[in-house]
Amino acid sequence: MALGTELDRRRTISRLALLTAVVELLGVVSLIIFFAVGGGPFGFINDVANGLVGLLSMALAWLWVPDLRTRWSTLGIGAATLGALIMVAGSILIIFDITGWYLAGLVSSVGSAFIGIWLLVSNRHHRQTSELPRAMILLGVTAAIFMIIGLLALPGVVAGIDDPQLAPWYVNAGLLNWMGTYLLYPAWCLWLSRRYGG
């Protein structure tokens, strides 16, 4: 790969990672304001942000993938792509009032879990290189593990559960993945942006 092309790729990765983090944090702030003021457009902003983060994460996965020819890279890209589509579906469900907030949240949690699989695969791959600092890889792996917890929500999605009171404990536990999605993942994206933009 030519030096100019590689530098352009790194800059694009940096900008894409920064945009992913900013959109995610905007979604988090919107959700906080939504619960603080009891409504307004902030829930809608959060729902749109969730879908956008899915799409941005898919683009980041395709661009940042270490080697398209490996089985693990293919798995990571496939998981990120599937996760993005599921997250967009979760946003559509709530934006158009097809389901309630709970089922839409479960769907988005499952989508985030698949993006977490990509994040785990990619960070574990970079353990073999000196491209990323060890602490950044640890943050990425930790974020990924939290995000993957969202797979526990899958039985709730399959059953169409739209009430947290009716959900088994493990389905509710799947919502813990938002700790990774809303906190650790944007922090990792900011670090990746700085690393590739420097």
Image: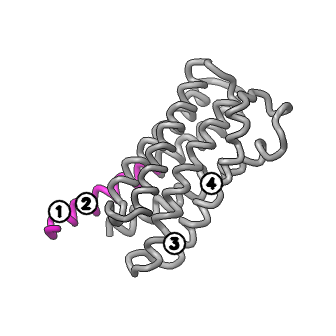
Task: Give the mark, 2 or 4, whose residue is nearer the N terminus.
Answer: 2
Foreground disc of the pair 4, 3: 4
Q: Position of residue 112 (x, y in %)?
A: 57, 46
Whether label 2 touches label 1, CB < 8 Å = yes
Task: Give me the C-alpha separation between circle 2 and circle 4.
Answer: 28 Å
Task: Give me the C-alpha separation between circle 2 and circle 3.
Answer: 20 Å
Q: Is residue 183 magenta-colored?
A: no
Say which amino acid is labelled 3. Ile
**Left or right of residue 8: residue 24:** right
Q: Position of residue 169 (x, y in %)?
A: 84, 44
Task: Give me the C-alpha separation between circle 4 and circle 3.
Answer: 16 Å
Q: Position of residue 154 (x, y in %)?
A: 67, 41
Of the numbered discs in the image, which one, if any, rests on residue 148?
4
Of the numbered discs in the image, which one, if any, rests on residue 117?
none
Task: Give the mark, 4 or 1, whose residue is nearer the N terminus.
Answer: 1
Callout 3 secondary element: helix
Q: Nearer the viewer, residue 102 or 80?
A: 80
In the rendered view, would you say 12 is above or below 128?
Answer: above
**Left or right of residue 44: residue 61:** left
Task: Give me the C-alpha separation between circle 4 and circle 1.
Answer: 33 Å
**Left or right of residue 134: residue 169:** right
Task: Give the mark, 3 or 1, whose residue is nearer the N terminus.
Answer: 1
Q: Name the residue furthest front.
A: 71
Say which amino acid is labelled 2. Arg
Give the residue pinned by disc 1: 5
Give the residue pinned by disc 3: 137
Which range of residues does the magenta coloring cover?
A: 1-20
Place residue 72 in its image quadrant: bottom left
